Amino acid sequence: MTAVTSRLPAYLKLASLQLQITYAYRGEVIGGLLVVLLRILLLKAVWTAAYAGRTSVDGVPLPDLITFLTLGNLQLVLMRPMLVWYLQQRIHEGQIGLDLARPVPFLGQLFAQQVGATAGLVPFVVLAVPLAFLVGNLAPPASPVAAIAYLASLSLAYLISTLIGLLMGLVAFWTVQTLGVGVIYEFATQFFGGALIPLSFFPPALRTIADLLPFQTQVFIPVSIYSGAISAPADIAGALGLQVIWIAALSVIVWFVWQHAKRVVTVYRG
Amino acid sequence: MSRITLSLALWTAGLRSALQYRTDTFIVIVMALAFQGTGFAFAWVLLSRFESLAGWTLGQVAFLYGLRLIVHAVAGVLTGPFFGLETQVRTGEFDRYLIRPLSPLLQFMTQRVEISIFGDLLGGVAIFIAANQLVGLAWTPSAIGYLVLAIAGGALAEGAVRILIGALSFRFLASTSILYLADSVFSTFANYPLTIFGGILQFLFTFGLPLAFVAYLPATVLLDRTAELQVNPALAYVAPAIGVLWIAIAVRVFNRELRTYQSAGS
Amino acid sequence: MPDPIIRVDQLVKTFRSPRRHDGRFGALRTLFTRDYTVKTAVDGISFAVESGELIGYVGPNGAGKSTTIKMLTGILVPTSGELQVAGLVPWRRREENALNIGVVFGQRSQLWWDLPLIESFDLVARMYRIGPERFRSNLGRFRELLGLDEFINTPVRQLSLGQRMRGDLSAALLHDPRIVYLDEPTVGLDVVAKERIRTFIEEINRDRGTTVILTTHDLADVERLCRRIILIDRGRVLYDGTVDGLTASYAPYRVLIVRLATDAGAVVPHDRPLDLAGVEVAKREAGAVWLRFDPTVIAAPALISEVVRRYPVSDLSIVEPELESVIREIYESGAVAT
């Protein structure tokens, strides 16, 4: 732990740099948020039409459903793995050697930058919340316990997003064309994360697939805790536990891939 | 006539230019399919659980969805390059169109072809054909004729919006982000029956942006659902003509804004 | 005497740009601002060009050269003044004007970047409605004069700068335009490539009588190709006439470099100026003196014999003023000498 604290100034500096860069690109950030708000608008309209006047379907009241989806989509904005694009850019520009040469662990650098970039997004997302409330719906958490558990789950989800983002970014060491990966990831998280259709409405076959993928841990699980769909303490623990398992699994995969990637870099420079 | 063959020659040159980048082509098409696929997967899964959406069955929604994708692809045939107009104006690259004996708008539109349109076309045709199995529409000659006109008219409407936004580049030098926003609006809302949206949005999407004319209104005609329309059904029948109107206005505005063009100095 | 092919009369071009606001909400305030800065790029330029002339259009950066050319080619609309090219007002009848002209930008290509060079030629031929006979004959000529064969099937983006420039030149001249505007055609090229381009320009001007307006920073281009030069700075014409006339009227001197057998300082003292009319000491170094003299006051042979009579000369040479230094002096003083 002392290793981390001694490097803290360096990490903070990297993080604040990314924060400034995010602010510099605020036009695009705002544009992206507008797109998400449009999506929420659509979801509300489509789901209201689907419910066709019924107050509740499968035990899910319409307002709760809309809150679910509104929150889920806002979450996805905050959890965007910015370092996918950062990594891809640095690798293609051949600058990655500079980053690796820094006297700070590379993975630590990336994590600091991801946090910085996300921090840059936060003010904009906060500003978007009232608009999201207008366009969709945002009920308060089901209970104080739910609120706390939600924050825990959200943090774990953020870690998972970062790890996946890291994996996708590392792909850039091998292939030239990496643009598609990040984009497909966005669709996958939306659909299989349950940000368009809550997973409880999925047909059985698709539900099985979704359960096997990590994306539900990024959207469906945190939001379910928030709304009280997962309320029994045992269930909450189980859900958080699933997230932890995914974090562990992804960390191992990332570590492996990273070892291979390091070898590729030395080939590059040689 | 010779102008048409010239435009075609320029367009195929633009297509060949884009195809030089082999890997890019593949990726772009896959991405377009993924993007549209997610949207459609949403509608599909939803409608397999719920019986209908504002009275529209899965087959009918798929019909609308596929039609809209096809229109979007056709619109992109000539208006894809507009996302790069702002840059070309800023760097002064746009000048080259002004010193050649041909409409700058035409030259600009044919310089390069957006390969993603083929992804959209592929997805759209697939969904449309599948939808037709479900809907069982009787394709009479007049229906086919109307379909062709509807696709053309819808493409003109969507293209006209891009040209109008592009025309902003000359005065304000900012259009790309607005283009992306408009594209999002069309991609998000034009795939669904407008009746699911409130009155204000329906009004905006009919008399503000020509979103309704892209696919929804023609679809109501083909699917014989004009009874549900808030507006006069006649408007749905003449939807293609509205597209022509929009493009005529857009081209005029573009050419007028071109006059105020101040190219970047040396 | 036929009408000039290009007639420019009191041409003015001003640009209005909104004053940029800084600080908070800066971008928003800039959008709604009423404050404009007005920049006058071209401030009353007048000149006339006869058909078949080869003119150098010279000026420092920001002088208004490209702005003038953009108005002549129809890209920009003038703020005021009159402009006629081959009987047309370029910005009013842009497409017709385009048929009469060819343009080459040194910094930017107009060829189809991703396609083989020959395809650009084909597309240009279609656009300008060039008949197959003329296309074949012109292209054949350019292939020979510029050596296009070795790269005519290569995509333009893979060409070297020199090759691309040859391609752009050919494309611009394929339709036998009456006037061709060349903007920095030799920039960034090596000596051999530059010479090749210059020879080509000279040939098309001579053989086809194509009027050439050459905008350049490279005064060697001007010295080699142009009989007439228009000098502009800060949007105004400073000089319009022959290159020789420019030197003669503005820098009417030559320099005699005298190398002495012994140290110059002792022989040619500072405090006593040379008692020769029209001669002054321009520079001195150990063992050499630069004498600037006005050839209209004292002829070179007379000066030489006088110098040799007075001083122990080991070597002599005469230097003409460089066009570059002449022009630089004109920019710095902003004076007109016609």
Image (spheres, rainbow, N blue to C red):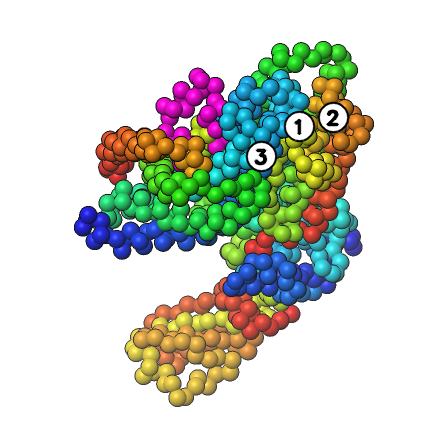
Q: Chain of mark 3?
A: A
Inspect the magenta stretch and tell me whether residue A143 lies in it. Answer: no
Q: Which mark is residue B193?
A: 1
Inspect the magenta stretch and tell me whether residue A211 lies in it. Answer: yes
Q: Amino acid at mark 2?
A: Glu
Q: Quadrant of the C terminus of chain A?
A: top left
Q: Residues within 10 Å of mark 2 (few under 14, many from 20)?
A: some
Q: Which residue is mark 2?
A: B228
Q: Nearer the viewer, mark 2 or mark 1?
A: 2
Residue C170's place in the image compared with C217, above or below, is above
Magenta stretch? A195-222
Q: Secondary structure at mark 2?
A: helix
Do the residues at discs 3 and 1 belong to one chain?
no
Q: Nearer the viewer, residue B109 or B169?
A: B169
Q: Which residue is mark 3?
A: A44
Q: Residues within 10 Å of mark 1 (few under 14, many from 20)?
A: many
Q: CA distance from mark 3 to mark 1?
A: 14 Å
Residue drawn 76% across and 24% down? B226
Q: Chain of mark 2?
A: B
The image shows a total of numbered marks equal to 3
Q: Amino acid at mark 3?
A: Lys
**Whether residue B230 can be seen here:** yes
